[in-house]
């Protein structure tokens, strides 16, 4: 016995007697079934025939399977597949672990950059590294699972559903980036406000009323927002976010329509097609009315 | 060091005082908010005189005792964004009321709330469809060949298009905060719209949701519109009148109908992206919108601090039209302030009433003496009470200062 053979659970003597017993049972059962006489077909319904045939097929299939499994030469292949299973699971876990590690590395890198990122009132070259990293990790490590081609008759629907999950994840990442940019002026305005207060304190000029302090801060915040909104970086992120949102909504609606097809309900697409036809028809009628100088109010319907 | 310590003590003392005041304010505010509040909009009585699909026309009864009542009725066309109730926000701040007291026979378009079935409606359907039918209806009802037309914001842009395509039906044109030239980077909307994929938005949403547009407008100035505005409310919530006015304004702002998808797409593509209107290159139903055909008198209002439609988007119109009677009025306020600020209430609507009356008189005089109206080309820059000649202008501009 080789080392590999020793490790295999299928080389254990206990497995073969069980397989042998199962095989014998199916063979005996098959023998016990009376052979179908040809004239029996005339007295049975087609449904019964189909059922019996299907049972025979299943029994034969199981017999073959049991026989194959009990043959000593097929054992290593089965054993290998069972050995491979933990390996697959390990690889999947490793992939997830790598992704987590990658995020952590980016976060550590980002933490080192805090305070160095951008200046007050300036929004060019924004350091959005964390979001790029998140997106990168998602696209490299996780997105692939949504791209696995589904099989079988429902493959089309599964594919659509996976695409919806994929688009939702992309939109979430983009939304996080957009919200983080939107929060930047707040962050910066507090910093500038603090500096301003410090300067005023040094001049012995601190605002006495909270309202005055608030007025200073809101003005700083407004200035930051105006600068942010005019920046190309913001416009780009805004449009990318809108685009991801639109991608998600389009696929979400299609998935819902797939689901709605199960019910006797018209979908948005059906209604839109109808509305479009109605709209064009109405335009033609209006044009004809104008050509003939007919006002809709002058028309009478004769019953 | 001593002085800063004293200041800090003072600050803490003030904070304690403030906390006490806030407590009193909140207690009074809770009484007010739980009491009876009047925050109804559009309280001036009107009658619906025309209906077509979702579109209605409101007719207001004017003051029949007003001096020099205008013979020609005025049709006001509001934008497809938000609602025309802004012109009749509250009894003491109502453009509608000022018009009626000034003797104007007033009609106003209520665009209603577009439904999914309206997503294929184009600008042409609004301008040459609904607007044309309404103008014809008013002309027929009053047995007159022409009416006065006033457009607000996008409604102003529609009115410009309409007047260029049907100049024979419009006697005087008034545009207020009306974008006509879109190639400017002064307003954030103009910057954002340049890269907007309108086709995709329309494919996704059908009609553009009012809530999405509202969010976009709030994001134009979040510091003021999402923070400062509500801080202001908290500070004044113990004043009943303030609360009523504030809630009225909130009701109006967030009463946002969806915009028909196809109209939105065309407006973004033809106007914001390609700036076709001001170049007289825009086409509606195969017909070119030639601004030189705008030969009727034109009064063009805009706001100096308008962050949605900046002055540069409005003030090119007067140079592009064919009319010789043109006046620009630049008010030192924002997009909405023109209509709702109590200060500009005294300037804006009375100015329109007077301007229309002047042209009504001219018309009477001209028809009596059979003389052509003398050419007047006025361009004013700032409104503040009196007018001043702008010597730099080639056409002897009248500048209101």
Image (cartoon, coloured by chain):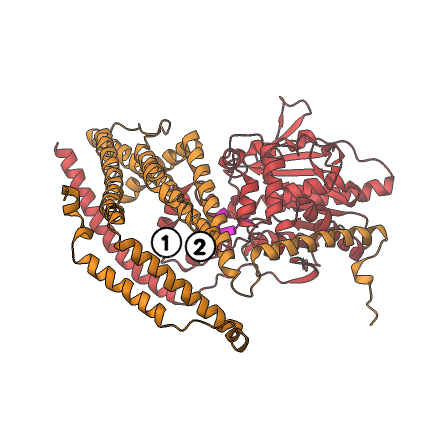
Direction left: furthest residue: B2
**Subunit bearing disc 1:** B
Q: Residue at x 45, y 57 (%)?
A: B247
- Dot 2 and dot 1 within a common chain: yes
Disc 1 is placed on an element classified as helix
Observer-nearest residue: A62 or A230?
A62
Q: Which residue is mark 1?
A: B236
Residue B243, image quadrant? bottom left
Res. B110 in view? no
Query: In the figure, is residue A229 to the left or right of B154?
Result: left
Residue A272: horizontal and vertical position, in percent? Answer: 61, 54
The magenta segment is: B208-213
Front residue of B44 and A271: A271
In the picture, which chain is red?
Answer: B
Q: Is residue B40 above or below residue A76?
A: below
Question: Is A167 within the magenta?
Answer: no
Image side of residue A98 versus residue A265, left or right: left
């Amino acid at each position: 016995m080789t080392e590999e053979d020793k490790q295999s659970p299928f080389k254990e003597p206990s497995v073969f007697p069980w397989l042998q017993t199962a095989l014998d049972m199916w063979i005996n059962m098959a023998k016990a079934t009376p052979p179908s006489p040809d004239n029996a077909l005339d007295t049975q319904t087609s449904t019964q025939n189909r059922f019996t045939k299907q049972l025979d097929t299943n029994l034969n299939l199981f017999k073959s399977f049991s026989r194959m499994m009990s043959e000593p030469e097929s054992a290593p292949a089965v054993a290998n597949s069972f050995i491979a299973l933990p390996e697959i699971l390990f690889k999947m876990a490793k992939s997830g672990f790598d992704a987590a590690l990658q995020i952590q590395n980016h976060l550590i890198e980002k933490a080192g950059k805090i305070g160095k990122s951008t200046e007050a009132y300036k929004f060019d070259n924004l350091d959005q590294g964390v979001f790029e990293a998140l997106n990168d990790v998602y696209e490299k490590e996780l997105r692939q699972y949504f791209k696995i081609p589904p099989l079988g008759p429902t493959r089309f629907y599964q594919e659509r559903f996976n695409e919806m999950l994929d688009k939702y994840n992309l939109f979430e990442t983009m939304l996080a980036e957009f919200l983080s940019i939107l929060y930047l002026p707040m962050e910066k305005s507090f910093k500038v406000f603090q500096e301003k207060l410090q300067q005023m304190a040094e001049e012995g000029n601190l605002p006495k009323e909270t309202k005055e302090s608030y007025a200073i801060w809101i003005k700083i915040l407004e200035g930051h927002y105006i600068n942010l909104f005019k920046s190309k970086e913001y416009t780009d992120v805004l449009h990318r976010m809108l685009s991801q949102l639109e991608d998600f909504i389009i696929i979400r609606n299609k998935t819902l329509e797939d689901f709605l097809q199960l019910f006797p309900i018209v979908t948005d697409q059906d209604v839109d097609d109808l509305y479009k036809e109605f709209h064009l028809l109405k335009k033609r009628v209006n044009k004809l009315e104008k050509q003939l100088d007919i006002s809709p109010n002058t028309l009478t319907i004769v019953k | 060091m001593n002085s800063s310590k004293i200041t800090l003590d003072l600050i803490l003392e003030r904070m304690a005082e403030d906390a006490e005041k806030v407590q009193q304010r909140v207690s009074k505010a809770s009484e007010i908010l739980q009491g009876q509040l009047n925050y109804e909009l559009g309280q001036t009585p009107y009658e619906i005189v025309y209906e077509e699909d979702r579109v209605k026309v409101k007719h207001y009864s004017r003051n029949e005792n007003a001096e020099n009542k205008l013979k020609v009725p005025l049709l006001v066309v509001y934008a497809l964004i938000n609602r025309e109730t802004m012109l009749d926000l509250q009894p003491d701040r109502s453009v509608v009321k000022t018009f009626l007291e000034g003797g104007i026979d007033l009609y106003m378009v209520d665009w209603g709330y577009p439904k999914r079935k309206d997503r294929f409606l184009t600008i042409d359907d609004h301008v040459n469809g609904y607007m044309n039918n309404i103008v014809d209806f008013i002309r027929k009802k009053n047995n007159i060949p022409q009416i006065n037309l006033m457009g607000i914001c996008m409604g102003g842009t529609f009115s410009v298009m309409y007047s260029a395509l049907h100049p024979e039906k419009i006697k005087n044109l008034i545009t207020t905060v009306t974008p006509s030239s879109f190639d400017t980077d002064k307003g954030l909307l103009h910057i954002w719209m340049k890269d907007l994929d309108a086709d995709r938005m329309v494919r996704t949403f059908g009609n553009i949701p009012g809530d999405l547009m509202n969010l976009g407008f709030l994001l134009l100035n979040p510091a003021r519109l999402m923070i400062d505005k509500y801080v202001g409310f908290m500070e004044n919530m113990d004043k009943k009148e303030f609360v009523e006015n504030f809630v009225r304004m909130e009701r109006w702002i967030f009463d946002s109908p969806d915009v028909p998808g196809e109209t939105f797409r065309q407006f973004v593509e033809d106007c914001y992206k390609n700036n076709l209107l001001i170049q007289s290159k825009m086409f509606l139903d195969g017909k070119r919108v030639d601004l030189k055909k705008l030969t009727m008198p034109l009064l063009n209002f805009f706001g100096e601090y308008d962050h949605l439609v900046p002055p540069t988007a409005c003030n090119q119109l007067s140079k592009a039209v064919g009319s010789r009677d043109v006046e620009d009025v630049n008010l030192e306020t924002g997009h909405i302030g023109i209509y709702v600020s109590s200060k500009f209430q005294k300037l804006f609507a009375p100015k329109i009433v007077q301007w229309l009356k002047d042209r009504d008189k001219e018309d009477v005089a001209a028809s009596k003496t059979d003389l052509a109206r003398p050419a007047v080309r006025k361009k004013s820059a700032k409104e503040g009470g009196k007018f001043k000649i702008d010597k730099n202008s080639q056409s002897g501009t009248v500048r209101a200062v």
